[in-house]
Image (tube, rainbow, N blue to C red):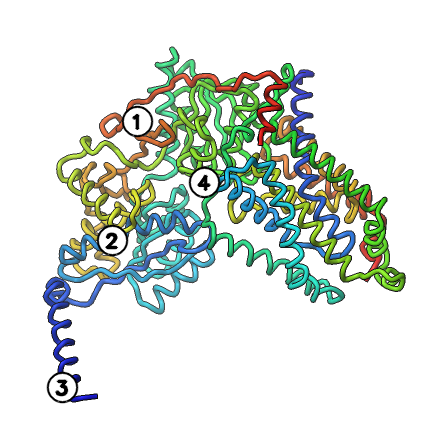
Amino acid sequence: MTVALFIQLLAAGVLLGGVYALISIGLTLIFGVMRVVNFAHGEFLMVAMYLSYYLVTSLHMNPYLALIVVAPGLYLFGLLVEIAIIKPTIGRSDVVQVFATVGLSIVLQAGALMAFSANVVGLNVPIANALLHLGWLTIGVPQLIAFLAAMAVAAGLFAFLGRTDVGRAIRATAQDRGAAALMGIDVPAIYRLTFALGSAMTGLAGGLLMPIYSVSPTVGEQFVLVAFVVVVLGGMGSVSGALIGGLLIGVVETFSGFVIDPQWKQAIYFLIFLIVLVVRPAGLFGVRGSEELSR
Amino acid sequence: MSRSFIARLRGALALVTLTALAVSPLRAAAAGPPIKVGAVFPFSGPLALLGQDSFDGANVALEMINAHGGVNGRQLEWVKADSPNAEAANSQAERLISQQNLKILFGSYASPIAVAASQVAERHHVIYWEEGAWTSTLFDNHPKYVFRVNVYAVPAGEAAVQFAADTVAPKIGMTAKTLKIAIVNEDGPFGTSVANAEVAEAQKLGIDVVAHLPYSAGTNDMTSLVLKLKAANPDVLLATSYINDATLLVKTMRSQAFRPKAIIGASAGFGLLALGKNLGGDVNGIFEADAPTNINPKGLPPGGQALYKEFINKFKAATGREPDGFSYMGFVGAYSLFHDVLPKAKDPDNPDDVRAAALAANVPAGAYPNGWGLKFDETGQNTRMFAAILQWQGGMPVVVGPARIAAAKPVMIPLPNWAYVPLHLAARIVSLLRL
């Protein structure tokens, strides 16, 4: 393998990892704070992609300008879903939550099928095909933007959780729901905010993916599995873990696809995933036992 | 209510009845109960779009035959059975046969549905008639009552390789012996059966296969695959993909500046109009082996031409859109059964009689609107079908081979380099950020 090829593969892997991190951050935030595994996460992504698609094709918006509609749109969507579906399941058994979010994913998929048909649609705007040629290295501009956005979102979320009162309240709720309530934190409000915020980040991810991928009602399935792998690998609830986990999976996938076989690349990152789980059951950056922090 | 009103109402009703009888003399003269045919298609779910498309074509055939008096005076009637996946196809086929007592099932556009429904039909000794599924496994268990009219994975893969050898190679100053091809395919049953046929045909013709790379259709990134292809440096790329991966493959080839002299896909992702929408101008020049669509009707004998016109007009009138490759297959599948097999069966309700009529059918190539005819081999596969080679020209797939039915000539061999917009980095960033 030449140096040029190595760097090209590394760049492709890191960029793909950025995409994976982007779609995982919202999921890990929601899980970390609420202990709710949102099985409809892939469908949230699908909703965001369709929203972005229609804003771009019918209103001729720039796909990146459309983000200022898509992210708040998904924030609202998340808020409504939390109030209508997630809130009643809080404090109930895990099975109830699983059924509620799996059911939601089926409803969203079937709804999209009725609304948009099974057609696969994609954006064909100049920026979707834009390339940066840096010597012998080629980088897709939408991939680069998605990667930078993943970094920015992670950094912003980090600062928000660490530096602001609301962020501290969110972390307090994540650590101990009961104690947080005793300290005067409005726990249901924090849950609403967290779920909506996580959805808005998924919205951001969907809008950023639209110039790269095509959308269909089942597009969520393409990404949701890898998002779960990234979240568990990085440590459930860990934002930096999602970032590192995403990058790791992206690089492993790209290199194993080249060195071993394209057919085997998923199998190989699952193998690594299993090994990490055996060695560190809480994931790379997770706190051991954190999955039982609050009940 | 007054008596005179009721009398008037009765009179009006009688008039309506009389009119109805007058406008459908054939229906009134039907000799016997209708022949019911089970329509096993995905009418809902992710496959619904093309399943419906296929059925719409088949329905034109049914209405045409009924308008001409039906099958020996008996009208035809669908019993629709929505089968979005193999499990549903299995239970729907079972229901149609045991509860509705149907003797003929017709389907299905999708391979998993075809395999499931045909096995149920075979078990009950009921005819299963396939119009569009591509799997190469339909006849693996040597069924007696399963027939397929359409082209499938093997002839399509062979056609793709033959096109590379016969048409592409001479235009780039090569022969089959010097040509290098690479094969990529999604690793499900569809991609695998096409790719295996391509590998076998390449070996037969002495073509060097420099890379054969299966991949998962759910992949999110194809950079490693494309860099592997680039390293293998083939003259021609043969690809069998669904729509998402086909789009991603071509986009990644562009971003990695990998440009073989020709790209030949096989149906599915490479034949859908969505590919043109996703890729814009980059789609032009790509070939694909597929069921023939919108052929040049001058290549058909007069009877075929008349049927071609009638089908297109009726399809447009019924659906308001142009028929695509799936509608053609649906039509040809149904028309062959209703027009060339059932009327010749001693008793169309007896599967053994239908089977005998099917095996005896001998319809010359070109009799159907897509250039096919009907002659089954001993397995139940129609032999008078073929794969056409289509090429994306001006954003639409057009038939460029075989020559007798081609609507255009193959162009862009070798493919020109990718068109990149030359811009300075700064200008590029400004232009990209322009909102």
Q: Residues within 10 Å of mark 2 (few under 14, many from 20)?
A: many
- Residue B257 shown left or right of residue B72 in the figure: right
Q: Residues within 10 Å of mark 4 (few under 14, many from 20)?
A: many
- Residue A95 shown left or right of residue B69 in the figure: right
Chain letter for mark 3? B
Name the mark nearer the viewer: 2 or 4.
4
Q: Residue at x 61, y 24 (%)?
A: B430
Question: Percent x, y for residue B188?
Answer: 50, 41
Chain letter for mark 2? B
Question: Percent x, y for residue B171?
Answer: 35, 14
Report the quarter where the C terminus of chain A lies. Answer: bottom right
Q: Earlier in the sequence, mark 1 or mark 2?
A: 2
Distance CA(mark 2)–CA(mark 3): 59 Å
Q: How many marks?
A: 4
Name the mark nearer the viewer: 2 or 3.
3
Distance CA(mark 3)–CA(mark 1): 70 Å
From the image, tell me which residue sits under label 4: B190
Q: Which mark is residue B4?
A: 3
Amino acid tagged 3: Ser
Secondary structure beneath dot 1 equals strand
Q: Which mark is residue B400?
A: 1
Amino acid tagged 2: Arg
Secondary structure beneath dot 2 equals helix
Distance CA(mark 4)–CA(mark 3): 69 Å
Nearest to the observer: residue B413 or residue B314: B314
Amino acid tagged 4: Phe
Q: Residue at x 64, y 41 (%)?
A: A205
Distance CA(mark 1)–CA(mark 4): 24 Å
Same chain assignment for discs 1 and 2 = yes
From the image, tell me which residue sits under label 2: B355
Distance CA(mark 1)–CA(mark 2): 35 Å
Q: Earlier in the sequence, mark 4 or mark 3?
A: 3
